[in-house]
Image (cartoon, rainbow, N blue to C red):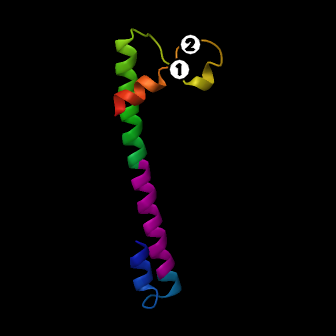
Amino acid sequence: MAADLRMLAGRLSGADLEARRQGHLRELEELKRELENRLNEQVRKAVEEVARARRMRIVLVKEATPLGGVDVTQDVLDHLK
């Protein structure tokens, strides 16, 4: 995308170049959102499988439980590998 903008820099007006840049930014943001959603889904499935294997009824985010509980982070990371 950067190469595309550099190539077009001398051919397009400033407004057209900015519009193209904004289009690329929107495309990158959509790709980022899609990749984050895929990763979140993979993590959710891994947490679900670890929790099921350890016979846990509930899994909370660490910030929600400052005291007590069982940390399953490493188990989830191992499962994702």
Give the residue at the far right of this rendering.
Answer: 66
- Residue type, numbered disc 2: Gly
**x, y percentage for residue 66?**
65, 19
**x, y percentage for residue 53?**
34, 13
N-terminal of the pair, mark 1 or mark 2, is 1
Q: Is residue 11 above or below residue 42?
A: below
In this figure, which residue is indicated by the disc labeled 1? 60
Q: Which residues are magenta?
A: 17-33
In this figure, which residue is indicated by the disc labeled 2? 69
- Residue type, numbered disc 1: Leu
Q: Is residue 74 above or below residue 26?
A: above
Q: Residues within 10 Å of mark 2 (few under 14, many from 20)?
A: few
Residue 31 part of the magenta-drawn span: yes
**x, y percentage for residue 9?**
46, 86
Report the side of 62 relative to 54 (left or right): right
Q: Nearer the viewer, mark 1 or mark 2?
A: 2
Q: Residue at x 49, y 88 (%)?
A: 13
Task: Check disc 2 and report its element: helix, strand or loop.
Answer: loop
